[in-house]
Amino acid sequence: MVVDSNKVFLKFFDDRYRIIHHLLFWLLLTVDYFFWIPDSRHPGDEMMHFVYFGIEMAVIYINLYVFVPFLLLKNRLWQFFTFTVVSILFTEFVEEWIEYTRSGHTYLNIIEKSKGITIFIWNIQDQMLFVYAAIGFKLFKIWIKNQRVIRYLENENLKTELDYLKSQINPHFLFNTLNNIYVQTKLDSKRASQTILKLSELLRYQLYECTKETVLLSKEIDYLKNYLELDRIRKSSSNVAFNVTGEANGITIYPFLFLPFFENAIKHGIDSKNESNITVNFLIEQKRITFTIENTKQEINNQGNPGGLGLTNTKRRLQLLYPGKYNLAIEDKGSLFFVKLILDLN
């Protein structure tokens, strides 16, 4: 099983693991404080180390839960940095004061009697490192949380828009089919019964297969074949060629992605009085689909603009579902209308 390292990394920063975050931070600070710092304060008096450690932890949490939310996140940057630096300096002076007053020195002798101004400054730098590291970690967690909220809202908006676009497509298809059946019941009841059977297969696919986010390409192709067959039953003068090259099993796509092209071909290309042609080709190469559809145009529509709302919605869906992974070409060749769509499913 392949594990997405990025997801694991981001999951680590989830608020559910905040106790682990704090424990790991305490452990890191403890290792640094008790093992790596050549501390000059009271050799042999380990209890004072815990006192100083507690003071520094208190300053870190004051910065995290007071200065960050009430100053930094409210864009009061100068106040934030001022309070942060002052808190660190104050902490170091308090620790020095405790150390030297316990040794019988006065506060005025703190710097003079210490082992050197260098160690004093080094202690401040070390504490600043941990304070700002903790703040950076908290800000990173806040950023990740905000990104999750943004992605959630984007997905909700995307789902709403896609559902709306899909709802615009399906009623249009159903209206066309029912209109076909209405005409056939008056002309040929036997042919009307065949149409009803085909329609039931299409509706079954819509009701039970297309409730999922994606569908099998093989079933989508069968659906499109049945769709064309419905129209062929009504208009015997139309010639339909439907070719599939490659293996479609196992490949999934978003439903009704190709349907508007078929609706457009039938609406503008099929003439019940004159011979009409529709040629459909699917070329499937692993994770790449090349789809083409070409249809003759009715003379009355030669000066028109084939496509309309259906193709506009399809372009919008492609932008939402396959951003940067599709290439759509539409050509009006006078007596012919040609569409080519290339999908990269990687």
Image (cartoon, rainbow, N blue to C red):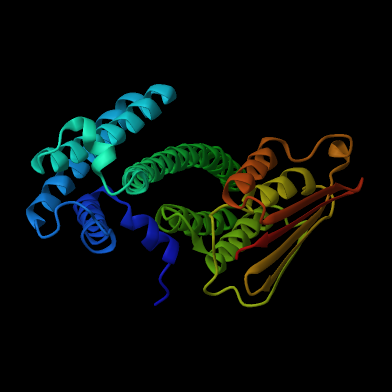
Residue 237: image x %, image y %?
78, 56
Q: Is residue 102 visible?
A: yes
> What residue is drawn where x is 65% and y is 57%?
228
Which corner quadrant holds the C terminus? bottom right
Q: Quadrant of residue 306?
A: top right
Q: Is residue 91 visible?
A: no
- In this picture, is 143 found above or below 22? above
Residue 202: image x %, image y %?
51, 56
Residue at the far right in the pictured view: 334
- Residue nearest the viewer, comparing 299 with 190: 299
Relative side of 87 to 210, left or right: left
Residue 249: image x %, image y %?
54, 75
- Residue nearest the viewer, comparing 9 with 53: 53
> What residue is drawn where x is 88% and y is 39%?
302
> What residue is drawn where x is 41% and y is 53%?
211
Which corner quadrant holds the N terminus? bottom left
Relative side of 140 to 333, left or right: left
- Residue nearest the viewer, comparing 283 with 90: 90
> What residue is drawn where x is 69% and y is 55%?
326
- Residue nearest the viewer, comparing 135 with 153: 135
Q: Quadrant of residue 136?
A: top left
Residue 274: image x %, image y %?
84, 50
